[in-house]
Image (cartoon, rainbow, N blue to C red):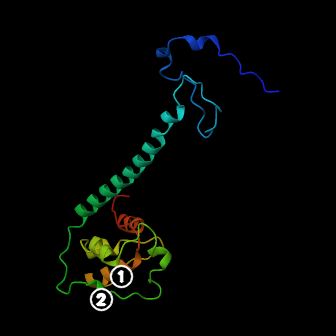
């Protein structure tokens, strides 16, 4: 037959004010969401306390990367004063993709994909010297004599935000 429910232990009669917070050591170890199977009736659900920290940690590490990116950019700006563009401004329509630099659909679908016009906008403020020191993850550097040539090549070498960050930081004189 069915077992009768166990009688409630005596100490549950203590006024609830003593039980506002779970005692230390009550939190289940991380990675065991079903432990203990039933939280004691007078405790708030410990998972309400557990939810905030992991998320906070995540946004913190992202902002740290943003911060490093900012610092890297500031160093680059100091190191290379921005050079004026030549008169023949580079237009997006003049950029030709070769087979080796053509953007695949899988890259284009990535959430941090940058359109050519966006890459051009980001990279055009750098000097030729800075641009030529940039390297993508395959080790390719933009070559050319005129800034427009170097820039046209640079725009082909990176497709996403992550790539462009690493590309720019490769030229950073303080690693």
Name the residue: 83% across, 27% down.
Answer: 1
Where's the C terminus, which quadrant? bottom left
Vertical position of residue 160 compared to residue 151: above or below: above
The residue drawn where x is 79% and y is 27% is 2
Of residue 6 and residue 125, the one placed in the foreground of this image is 6
Can residue 139 be seen from the camera position used here?
A: no
Q: Position of residue 152 (x, y in %)?
A: 32, 82
Residue at 38% over, 68% down: 164
Locate residue 26 relative to residue 161 in the image: left or right: right
Q: Nearer the viewer, residue 7 or 25?
A: 7
Quadrant housing residue 14? top right
Which mark is first along the chain, 2 or 1? 2
Q: Position of residue 112 (x, y in %)?
A: 41, 66
Quadrant for residue 76, please give it. Answer: bottom left
Q: Secondary structure at mark 1?
A: helix
Q: Is residue 28 left or right of residue 67?
A: right
Q: Is residue 131 visible?
A: yes
Q: Which mark is residue 3?
A: none
Q: Residue furthest right?
A: 1
* Residue count near mark 1 (Cα–Cα under 10 Å), binned few <14, some 14–19, many ≥20: many
Number of numbered discs present? 2
The spot of residue 38 in percent (x, y) is 63, 30
- Residue ID for mark 2: 94
What is the secondary structure assignment of the residue under circle 2?
helix
- Whether residue 173 sits left or right of residue 6 in the image: it is left
Give the labeled residue for mark 1: 153
Please give the name of the residue rendered at 56% of the width and 29% of the height, measured from the top-left corner: 27
| Mark 2 neighbour class, 10 Å CA radius: few under 14, some 14 to 19, many 20 or more | few
In the rendered structure, are the residues bearing label 1 and label 2 in contact, judged by CB atoms less than 8 Å apart? Answer: no
Distance between the alpha carbons at the discs numbered 1 and 2:
12 Å
157 and 140: which is toward the camera: 157
Looking at the image, residue 157 sits to the left or right of residue 41; the answer is left
């Amino acid at each position: 037959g069915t077992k009768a429910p166990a009688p409630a232990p005596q100490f549950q009669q203590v006024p609830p004010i003593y039980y506002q917070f779970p005692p230390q050591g009550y939190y289940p170890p991380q990675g065991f969401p079903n432990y203990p199977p039933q939280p004691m009736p007078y405790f708030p659900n410990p998972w309400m306390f557990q939810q905030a920290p992991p998320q906070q940690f995540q946004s913190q590490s992202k902002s740290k990367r943003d911060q490093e990116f900012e610092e890297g950019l500031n160093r680059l700006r100091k190191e290379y004063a921005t050079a004026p563009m030549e008169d023949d401004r580079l237009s997006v329509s003049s950029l030709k993709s070769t087979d080796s630099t053509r953007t695949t659909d899988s890259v284009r679908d990535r959430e941090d994909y940058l359109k050519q016009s966006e890459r051009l906008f980001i990279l055009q403020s750098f000097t030729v010297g800075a641009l030529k020191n940039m390297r993508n993850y395959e080790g390719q550097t933009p070559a050319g004599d005129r800034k427009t040539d170097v820039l046209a090549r640079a725009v082909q070498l990176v497709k996403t935000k992550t790539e462009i960050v690493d590309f720019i930081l490769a030229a950073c004189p303080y690693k």
